[in-house]
Amino acid sequence: MRLKREPIGGSFQNQGGGNAGVKHQTRIVLDSAGHLIEEWRRRATTCERRQQTTRKARPQADQALGSGILFTYPQLATLAGVQGVVVYALASALPLLSFAALGPIIRRKCPQGFVLTEWTRQRYGTLAALYLSFMTLVTLFLYMISELSAIGQVVNLLTGIDGLPVLIVECVITTIYTSVGGFKVSFFTDNIQGAMVLGLILIATITIGVETKIDTSLIESSGLTKASLLGWQLLYILPVAILTNDFFLSNFWLRTFSAKTDRDLWLGITGAVVATLVIITLVGSTGLIAAWAGVWPGPEDAPVDGSVAFFALLTQLPNWVVGVVVVMSVTLSTAAFDSLQSAMVTSASNDLFRNRLNIWWIRAGVVLIMIPVVVIAIRAPSILQIYLISDLVSAATIPVLVIGLSDACYWWRGFEVVVGGLGGLFTVFLFGTVYYGDAQLGAELMLLEQGLYTADWGAFGAFVAAPVGGLLWGFGALGLRLGIQYVSARLRGQRFDALDRPVAVSGPQLVDPEAGRDGGTWDNTEISSDAPGLAKTTGKFF
């Protein structure tokens, strides 16, 4: 399903100076960004000192919200109705609690690490950590594409301006100020990101309430208040997709591990869950309003796609409101994009190169990656499809990975994680080939070419095949590894010890060197590290 890039009905291009006003406001915010760089440079030094002494949990709601939510949630509402909005909101917000539950466990198991890949290195070995790092970078790459694609379409739909220049300027600006201030600047812009989301919702709520007229006769006939097969499928698909995919995002883990105490972490994430739930429900409701106001699906000669339902409502609003929305959307996208950019730099530097490569080489590599990101974003067929591809990858990888969190599964190693993750994706292909009776359609299912919202069970089956198939392949790899090790031990005349419990599955307990402050602590045993942020021990792969 391809999102339209033409202005809706050409309405804003036909309103004289209105479009020029929107262009002017857009230029203002882009020009103003340059003047903020020096201020961010000055704040960066102060921010660094403060974060070394005070590490409260940052609200993770900001990380779950980008300009893409203005497309995906209203579209789901037009397809699955009220049931879809509620399920999507819960599936997006509740998985954040997993970081509060698992964050302290992983931190104590790998005290020197600050992202999931560090625990993976300590538990499963270097090869498994590199595998997870690659998948993490792929996920970030896809999210960057979706973010740029979304804002490009926002600008194009509302103003008629080609979105490419905006994407290029956004990439340049975020590259400059993240290079100046690093991840600390991303923390600062998170506040802007949250403010823009709230501002957009407030403006949309007020203006839609004043200008939009709901046809009550359409409420019943639309069928959006009734349960549907798709709605019931989403009860499984969305929690699996979003929960597993959140594990891949380094920016979530960085904020999780920045919490000084478990209590701070739970408080911060609980607030994020509530905020995310409310915001997503409100945004998703615009799809329902568009349907009941007759804006969606639009006339037969100019149909309106559900993905632009939020912006289709804006055709009824004054031009100055549209201008403000465009400016706020660009600001929101910039704040979300710099977090992804910083997370990619951090993941590549820490996980792939172990902080042995100069950070500026890493930043240069990320700049080069921006080129294909922009090219693909301009041609991206669907933001939802991009999200679903990354969700499918995580659904195959994460279940076999988290088995190692249990000390009872000490026999689970990196070989099983890698084989299981790749096997899960291969199982999706096998399922698609059998279900559709065509190998090509099976391959297309791995890319979810038909999207999530098809009348068949293809997408549902894919999200069942990925985790279940991954676990089956993982246990099959376990049997193969144990068989090889058993035969090898017999041939060498040695004792078979592959199932012996190791002396220590987890690492030493973490102590925050500043834990005495504010009365919080992680543990009572002091540890030292020659390389902060890096695991000193490496687990077994085979």
Image (cartoon, helix red, strand yellow):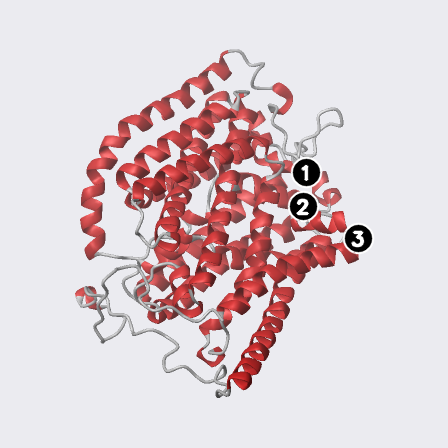
Mark found first going from the N terminus, 3 or 2: 3
- Quadrant of the rendering where the N terminus is positioned: top right
Q: In screen coordinates, is 392 left or right of 504?
A: right
| Residue identified by numbered label 2 | 451
Q: Say whether residue 275 is visible.
A: yes
Image height of 522 relative to 25, above or below: below
Dividing the picture into quadrants, the one containing residue 33 is top left
Which residue is at 55% across, 20% downward?
A: 160
The residues bearing labels 3 and 1 have C-alpha atoms spaced at a distance of 19 Å
Work out how far the residue at label 1 is from the one at label 2, CA to CA, in angstroms: 7 Å
Which residue matches tag 3? 436
Q: Residue at x 45, y 35 (%)?
A: 370
- Tell me whether the residue at label 1 lies in contact with that at label 2, contact meaning CB atoms closer than 8 angstroms: yes
Q: Is residue 153 left or right of residue 187?
A: right
Looking at the picture, tell me which residue is in the foreground, 51 or 507.
Answer: 507
The residue under label 1 is 1
